[in-house]
Amino acid sequence: MADETGKPVMTVSRLREYMNELETLRSVDRKEVNDRLRAARSLGDLSRNREYDEAKREQARIETRIGELEEILRQTMTED
């Protein structure tokens, strides 16, 4: 939903949900995936390490979602 200027409009509830999700991704999920990557690296050969590949995919998903949320919040909270 957008206002007459095209700026996204969102409920306070949805805004809180996005902010909470962003905080969780940054503080919890990033740490967990970094721990998984560290453990997978300790197993040796990364070219045949399924745990490492899965953790890298999860890391990419987390970073993509963080970027999406940051952009949504930036657009919503920017005053013109």
Image (cartoon, rainbow, N blue to C red):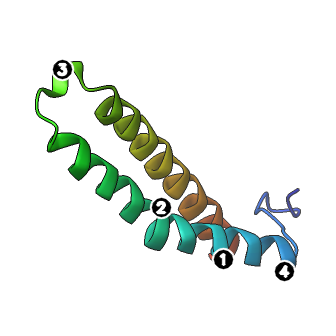
* Label placed on residue 77: 1
Q: CA distance from mark 4 to mark 1?
A: 11 Å
Provide the secondary structure element on which disc 4 rests: helix
Q: Nearer the viewer, residue 37 or 2?
A: 37
Give the percent coordinates (x, y) of residue 22.
57, 68
Give the percent coordinates (x, y) of residue 44.
11, 33
Mark 3, residue position:
47
Mark 2, residue position:
29
Q: Please name the residue shown 78% across and 62% down the image.
A: 8
Q: CA distance from mark 3 to mark 4?
A: 46 Å
Q: Amino acid at mark 4?
A: Val
User: Which of pointers 2 and 4 lies earlier in the amino acid sequence?
Assistant: 4
Q: Please name the residue shown 57% across and 52% down the image.
A: 68
Q: Amino acid at mark 1?
A: Met
> In this view, which residue lies farthest toward the front?
43
Mark 4, residue position:
12
